[in-house]
Amino acid sequence: MATANDRAVLQTIFNPSTPFGDIPGLDEEGDDDAQEEGEAFAPELLEQVRDLELQGVSAAESGDVSAALERFGEAIRLLPERASGYNNRAQALRLRGDVAGALRDLDTAIRLSRGHGRAACQSFVQRGLIHRLQAREEEARQDFERAARLGSAFARQQLVLLNPYSALCNQMLCEMLGRLRNPGGTGGE
């Protein structure tokens, strides 16, 4: 399904030096979207759109972001009311460096999903990452909180990283462990 691929693209955005793949700990949030989509969209059309999205992710995986954008665009043209297509295209836009376009697509995905389900969770995580990269900590925190409420362990981890008290405690804990490991040293290693 596209959501596993969403995680792969997020991994590329969040940690571009690693191979295209899953973000460890990013949850599968259940099958709510699949069930709702099966009721909302014609099965043949939905299957065609999902196939286009998988082709788009494969193209992004191989470094062909232009082809990925074409596939995601085709999927959106076929089912413009399906949130997942916008979320996927946002990831490809971000890879291309079009942050404004990515944010527009993420806003659309969140609106179409009504803030519920897997597509919304993935969109909140991705938008939170973009906000974090832009040093917009409060907006990032809000999006990660929404994604965490939808079940994302990755978003919960990001909330911990954004908490200044948590960061201070982690720093103090690292220093203490360093001193315990090397009682005669400076505590750094």
Image (cartoon, rainbow, N blue to C red):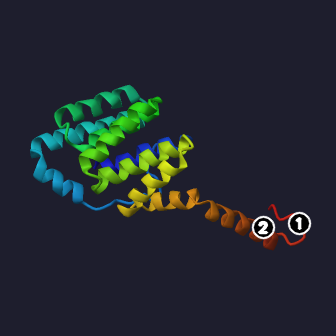
Image height of 109 relative to 151, above or below = above
Q: How many marks?
A: 2
* Horizontal side, residue 177 vs residue 65: left or right: right
Q: Residue furthest front?
A: 138
Q: Are marks 1 and 2 in contact (CB under 8 Å)?
A: yes
Q: Position of residue 168 (x, y in %)?
A: 68, 63
Residue name at image x 27 percent, y 45 percent: 111
Residue name at image x 57 percent, y 56 percent: 162
Q: Earlier in the sequence, mark 1 or mark 2?
A: 2
Task: Classify residue 185 by image quadrant.
Answer: bottom right
Q: Position of residue 112 (x, y in %)?
A: 24, 45
In this view of the protein, which residue sits in the foreground, 113 or 64? 113
| Kind of element beneath mark 2 | helix
Please name the residue that numbered disc 1 is placed on.
Answer: 185
* Horizontal side, residue 68 vs residue 51: left or right: right
**Mark 2 residue type:** Gly
Q: Is any part of residue 67 visible from this angle? A: yes
* Horizontal side, residue 134 vs residue 107: left or right: right
**Mark 1 residue type:** Gly
Please name the residue that numbered disc 2 is placed on.
Answer: 178
Residue name at image x 17 percent, y 57 percent: 35
Q: Is any part of residue 15 visible from this angle? A: no
* Horizontal side, residue 135 vs residue 151: left or right: right
Where residue 108 is drawn, which disc sits there?
none
| Kind of element beneath mark 1 | loop
